[in-house]
């Protein structure tokens, strides 16, 4: 197969002319024949003025280019879509698959022998990895790295666990307007991704566990010099992969590597979003993520990383404690150390190089875990026939077995309008229910599963309630929150049948979530549901594609035709 500049020639019916033309035009950039005859490493540029989490991408790119050139290959940078959490309407999840398609097609369309994909803010790493797995070109993944921590009145602050905690205090009247404004300027003190164990950190850690990025690359803070040395080293590795034509993602990603990723996700107290993204990545390959297996692993794997929101520390502390290599060393036989990585080393080599940091307490030993069980549990029951997820490590232990009266919100808008209504019939023992917030219903499965505690209860001191929905939740949030109820209500899932006053029983030890209404009554309600029609927002364009082909959470919310085998 052709390589370098000769790959994938534009079709003019004369291959010689196509190459002649390509070289003529690219020489306009000042490249020499020597440069153009080298193996090519493509580098995705996910910088955007709208994406502060990716603020260090220009510096990362410079470092990668340096590494590529020091190893005798030719770097070529190209743009892809960039998605920032708080700048994506209606949600970043709605755009993840668009970014994955963009990146995949640009990797295929342009000549390159290897590619370095750079991502970080929640949906960008999964999108770029999904693309890389589908394109199956030798790939190095570089996370942009976490922000450093902020400080406020002697307290350490982290986006966005503390954004939510302090906003809840403001809602409850415990802090005033001036203080919340001061906090606003201190929550994100540098470029980089959220520095708690949110989705960005989760995805960076499991990328490292999958063997797709260099050791320690998940945790090095975004502004640190080490981040750019790691990027330079990533460039060198990519250049060697371009010359060797491998390894490709299909040679790295095996059932063992996906199992390792799930073990790490449980042990770090990972974000529930990570499960959806890992499922989508696996579905791009011949492998699968099975919710039952994931739950079983959760019973065996303790949470060892002491990071917010499950614990106390932040990503830079995890890094200084030895990062993912040290965590995998502590996990011992729970990790398959024969799994390969992009450098040609196995995880056994990576773990052998893990640093021993005396006195660190961010990565616990297995005999002294943060939680004896993993971060997440998978629930089933008549409310969630295809599953639901709860991040039990960030929930209130006393609410993990709870039966309460349903208080139902029809949509995110309905919830926003009514949740603080002083006349809302709600008390602290009730179960807040949000529906029509799933992949198709909202659309884009907003992170609305963290329903706010109704103001009148928050002011009375209620800190947590059982909240259930077909939505997602930010990995940075805390609470007893059941998410990803599948199938979602917009496609006729049982969540659509719940009425105010119904009793709902959550029992995490039994892995169950049930609506305590008899089957005959549920059947009557099901028959009365209005038939699904194409909503106005989905009449054209990307929205139409999204609405017609989006899969449910248990299948990773990819488009049905983008899975490994394609088609339905
Ligand atoms: Fe970008 Fe949190 S907002 S990672």
Image: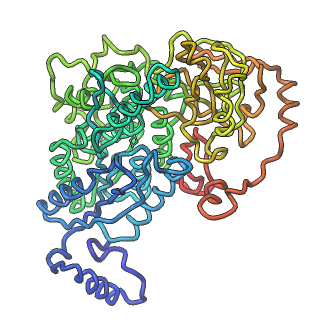
Q: Which quarter of the rendered picture does the N terminus lie within?
A: bottom left
Residue at x 22%, y 79% (from the top left corner): 29
In the image, 344 versus 509, the foreground residue is 509
Say above or below: 158 vs 240: above
Disc tally is: 0
Q: Which quarter of the rendered picture does the C terminus lie within?
A: bottom right
Display colour scheme: rainbow
> x and y percent of residue 526 in the render?
83, 34
Residue farthest along the left direction in this orientation: 70
Residue at x 52%, y 21% (from the top left corner): 172
Residue at x 36%, y 51% (from the top left corner): 249
In the image, 284 versus 156, the foreground residue is 156
Q: Is residue 6 left or right of residue 474?
A: left
Say above or below: 51 vs 275: below
Residue at x 43%, y 56% (from the top left corner): 131
Residue 464, by quadrant, is: top right
In the image, 518 versus 190, the foreground residue is 190
Q: Is residue 284 left or right of residue 111?
A: right
> x and y percent of residue 388 in the render?
60, 29
In the image, 106 versus 283, the foreground residue is 106
Where's ligand 1: which quadrant? top left
> x and y percent of residue 350 in the render?
21, 35
> x and y percent of residue 413 in the render?
66, 40
Residue 524, by quadrant, is: top right
């Amino acid at each position: 197969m052709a390589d370098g500049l000769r790959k994938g020639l534009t079709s003019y019916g004369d291959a010689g002319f196509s190459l002649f033309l390509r070289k003529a035009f690219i020489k306009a950039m000042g490249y020499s024949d020597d440069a153009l005859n080298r193996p090519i490493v493509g580098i995705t540029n996910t910088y955007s003025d709208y994406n502060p989490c990716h603020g260090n991408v220009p510096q990362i790119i410079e470092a990668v280019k340096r590494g590529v050139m020091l190893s005798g290959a030719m770097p070529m940078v190209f743009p892809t879509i960039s998605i920032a959490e708080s700048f994506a309407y209606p949600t970043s999840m709605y755009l993840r698959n668009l970014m994955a398609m963009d990146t995949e097609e640009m990797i295929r369309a342009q000549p390159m022998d290897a590619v370095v994909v750079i991502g970080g803010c929640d949906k960008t790493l999964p999108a770029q990895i999904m693309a890389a797995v589908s394109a199956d070109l030798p790939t190095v993944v570089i996370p942009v790295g976490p922000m450093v921590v902020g400080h406020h009145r002697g307290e350490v602050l982290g986006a966005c666990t503390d954004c939510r905690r302090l906003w809840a205090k403001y809602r409850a009247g415990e802090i005033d307007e001036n203080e919340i404004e001061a906090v606003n300027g201190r929550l994100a003190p540098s470029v980089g991704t959220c520095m708690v164990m949110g989705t960005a950190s989760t995805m960076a850690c499991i990328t490292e566990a999958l063997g797709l990025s260099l050791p320690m690359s998940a945790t090095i803070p975004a502004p640190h010099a080490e981040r750019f040395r790691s990027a330079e080293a990533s460039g060198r590795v990519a250049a060697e992969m371009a010359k060797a034509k491998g390894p490709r993602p299909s040679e790295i990603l095996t059932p063992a590597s996906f199992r390792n990723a799930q073990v790490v996700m449980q042990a770090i107290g990972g974000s529930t979003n990570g499960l959806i993204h890992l499922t989508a990545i696996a579905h791009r390959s011949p492998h699968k993520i099975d919710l039952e297996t994931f739950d079983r692993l959760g019973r065996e794997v303790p949470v060892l990383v002491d990071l917010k929101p499950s614990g106390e520390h932040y990503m830079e502390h995890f890094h200084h404690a030895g990062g993912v290599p040290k965590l995998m060393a502590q996990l011992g036989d729970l990790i398959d150390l024969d799994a390969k990585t992009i450098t040609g080393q196995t995880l056994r080599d990576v773990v052998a190089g893990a640093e021993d940091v005396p006195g660190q307490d961010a990565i616990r030993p297995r005999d002294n875990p943060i939680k004896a069980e993993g971060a997440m549990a998978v629930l089933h029951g008549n409310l969630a026939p295809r599953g639901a997820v709860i991040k039990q490590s960030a929930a209130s232990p006393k609410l993990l077995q709870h039966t309460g009266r349903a208080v139902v919100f029809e949509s995110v808008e309905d919830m926003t309008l009514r949740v603080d209504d002083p006349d809302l019939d709600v008390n602290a023992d009730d179960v807040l229910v949000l529906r029509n917030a799933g992949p198709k219903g909202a659309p884009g499965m907003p992170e609305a599963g963290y329903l706010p505690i109704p103001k009148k209860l928050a002011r009375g001191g209620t800190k947590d309630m059982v909240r259930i929905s077909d939505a997602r939740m930010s990995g940075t949030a805390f609470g007893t929150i059941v998410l990803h109820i599948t199938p979602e209500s917009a496609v006729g899932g049982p969540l659509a049948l719940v009425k105010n006053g119904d009793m709902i029983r959550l029992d995490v030890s039994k892995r169950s979530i049930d609506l305590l209404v008899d089957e005959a009554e549920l059947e009557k309600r099901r028959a009365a549901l209005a038939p699904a029609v194409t909503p106005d927002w989905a009449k054209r364009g990307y929205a139409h594609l999204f609405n017609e082909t989006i899969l449910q959470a248990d299948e990773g919310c990819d488009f049905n035709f983008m899975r490994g085998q394609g088609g339905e």
